[in-house]
Amino acid sequence: MTGLSSSRNGSFEDGEREALINETNRTNASLNPQHKPRVHWTRWPSEAIRLTWSTLVRDYVNVLLVFVPLGIISGALNWDSTAVFVLNFFAIVPLASLLSFATEELAATMGQALGGLMNATFGNAVELIVSIIALKDNQIRVVQASMLGSILSNILLVLGCCFFVGGLRYSEQTFNSTVASTMSSLMTVASASLIIPATLYASLSSSDNNAKQTDKNILLLSHGTAIILLILYVMYLYFQLKSHAALFEEVPNEDMENQGDLVEAEEDHILSPVAATIALILVTILVAICADYLVGSIDSIVEKTGMSRTFIGLILIPIVGNAAEHVTAVVVAWKGKMDLAIGVAIGSSLQIALFVTPFLVILGWIMDRPMSLHFHIFETVAFFISGLVVTFLIQDGKSNYLEGGLCLGMYMILALAFYVYPDDVDEGAMFHA
């Protein structure tokens, strides 16, 4: 009897417990379709491998992950600066995609407000990490250029691609004009926050103030403006996610409704909150390492190629940091979801203008770095004109491929202008002259 009892206990441990877990999972699944089966602790290695594989094969851009170890090795072994820059440049592209994916998976398990805050915090994590490292190295021009470049690439390049690609499939797409108007107003305030320091600098430079006192006054204005912009950003989050959430509801696209072939089932999320958090931490660490080597090689790249720091920060780095958002916005625009596409493109620009840039100004204040909101007049005018063009295009709540072409053409003109724009422009000397 003792042997039989032992056999029965062993059998229960090895077989009946698994059967009981499976039956419980089936019961919970039938009662709650959102329930995810509980994985037995002995199966967690295989489950981890399955989740990793599912995450990696979900996007073709993850093929570029091979550049991550190569970029880290090249930086650690002090390879040629061009190789270090190129390898880490391509390494950050798939890491940005994974960072965006992990953020979306984690935000999906939270409420709308907290999920929106997560996306706001990590949506531009790559640009933020690159800028913090550049700020630490006192490369203020790279920081300013990458911030402005992120805004321009989103409101012109990404939005232009959305309008153009969506316009190729639908003769006309509609979106929430109220939301577009609100975003345009916020973008106008953001551009004013750059115009005011630039014009004040021009006025102070033409007066009897010495250069040191002028820079001190500009920093004082920048610190106060940064605090105000952060407050406005918090107000905007509350307005969008809580008090006036109904205004941000999606506007149905008539062309999409007529086709009827784009009705999609609710997305099945791959990662659990714990897995998404672990992925978020690991990818953030890898982005920080690759960004450190990327920024460290910029000086040598400038000397070898003749490209300006402004062009690298304004055109190249934003393309890397916004790669995942670019693809996401274009795909949803092709599917007819223009409200989501505009939310990705212009919403990301607002995050940079109202949160990331003021945050870096405050961080520079803490780190004793002269990070200010004083951009060169040419950059400020370019930002203002770009915002003006986008405001005119989205105010009617409709889009087509011609409007997309206008945005893309504007971006190409600015890219050419910034390619020939030098780093060593002395605006103070210009005004004194």
Image (cartoon, rainbow, N blue to C red):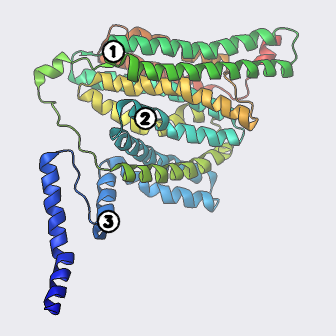
From mark 2 to mark 3, how far is it between C-alphas?
28 Å
Nearest to N terminus: mark 1 or mark 2: 2
Q: Which residue is mark 2?
A: 119
- Considering only vertical position in the picture, is 313 above or below 241? below
Q: CA distance from mark 3 to mark 1?
A: 44 Å
- Disc 3: which residue: 44
**Numbered mark located on residue 32 in the image:** none
Residue at 79 percent of width and 22 percent of height: 215
In the rendering, at what x and y percent does residue 80 appear? 62, 55
Q: Is residue 188 left or right of residue 293?
A: left
Q: Of tags 2 and 3, which is closer to the observer?
A: 3
Question: Residue 384: x, y in percent?
Answer: 55, 13
Three-letter code, disc 2: Asn
**Is the residue 75 above or below the residue 15 in the image?**
above
Dot 2 or dot 3: first in sequence order is: 3
Label 1, secondary structure: give it: helix
Q: Are marks 2 and 3 in contact (CB under 8 Å)?
A: no
**Which dot marks residue 247?**
1
Q: Secondary structure at mark 3?
A: helix
